[in-house]
Image: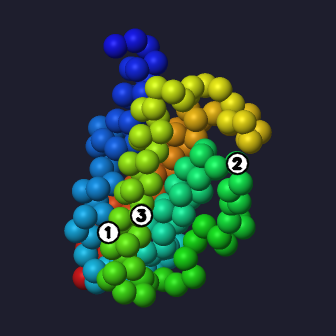
Amino acid sequence: MDNIDSLRHHLVNLLTKAEAHVDARAELKDFPAKLRGAKPKGAPHTPWQLLEHMRLAQWDILRFSLDPKHKSPKFPEGYWPKTDAPPSDAAWQGSVKMFLADLDEMCTLVNDKKRDLFSPIPHGQGQSLLREALLVADHNAYHLGQLVLLRRTLEAVK
């Protein structure tokens, strides 16, 4: 395995494995329905808001990485849901499914040997695929940590 293949492998692990961070699949798989729209006193967000924010931000980064015609949502309001709770169980499940599908697509992009991780994205302003993958990993790790803390706090309050 050469250095670039090794880097691709480590990036995918950073995006998907529970090495130093929480495993997104495991955390989202059985998140209790009764907690999804709950917000403990003083907390800025609900689990639903965090999930949707992660989904929207990751989707935006992925689409930017692939599509020169992509238009990002207005910041910050375009990156957060309007409601505290998901409108239905199907909405939560759909958001989880889309989040994980986009995460898988980012991993596929990182693993594509035809793509140079270091070259600037032609329609960007100096961003590279490496930078975008690291941004997704960092953003997801931060908010997954918040989600875990929020879940534990909500479970302790009941």
Sequence-wise, which precedes: disc 3 or disc 1? 3
Mark 1 surroundings: few (<14), some (14-19) or many (≥20) residues within 10 A: many
Contact check, label 2 and label 3, Cβ < 8 Å = no
The vertical placement of 157 against 147, above or below, is below
x then y, percent, for residue 31: 27, 70
Contact, mark 1 vs mark 2 (Cβ under 8 Å): no
**Which three-letter amino acid code belongs to the residue tagged 3?**
Met
Vertical placement of 6 versus 127: above or below? above
What residue did someone put label 2 on?
Answer: 68
Q: Residue at horizontal 41%, vertical 64%? A: 98
Taking the spot 55% from the left edge, 50% from the top edge, the residue there is 62
Residue at the spot 42% in from the left edge and 60% down from the top edge: 99
The local secondary structure at tag 1 comes to: helix
**141 left or right of 23 in image:** right
The residue carrying pointer 3 sits among few (fewer than 14), some (14 to 19) or many (20 or more) residues within 10 Å by Cα, namely some
Residue 131 visible in the picture: yes
- The picture places residue 158, in percent across and down from the top left corner, at 25, 82
Residue sticking out furthest to the right: 125
Residue 98's disc number: 3
- As helix, strand or loop, the secondary structure at mark 2 comes to loop
Question: Alpha carbon of mark 3 to alpha carbon of mark 1: how far?
Answer: 21 Å
**Helix, strand or loop status at disc 3:** helix
* Residue topped by disc 1: 151
Q: Earlier in the sequence, mark 1 or mark 2?
A: 2
Amino acid carrying label 1: it is Arg
Q: Amino acid at mark 2?
A: Pro
Please name the residue shown 32% across and 49% down the image.
22
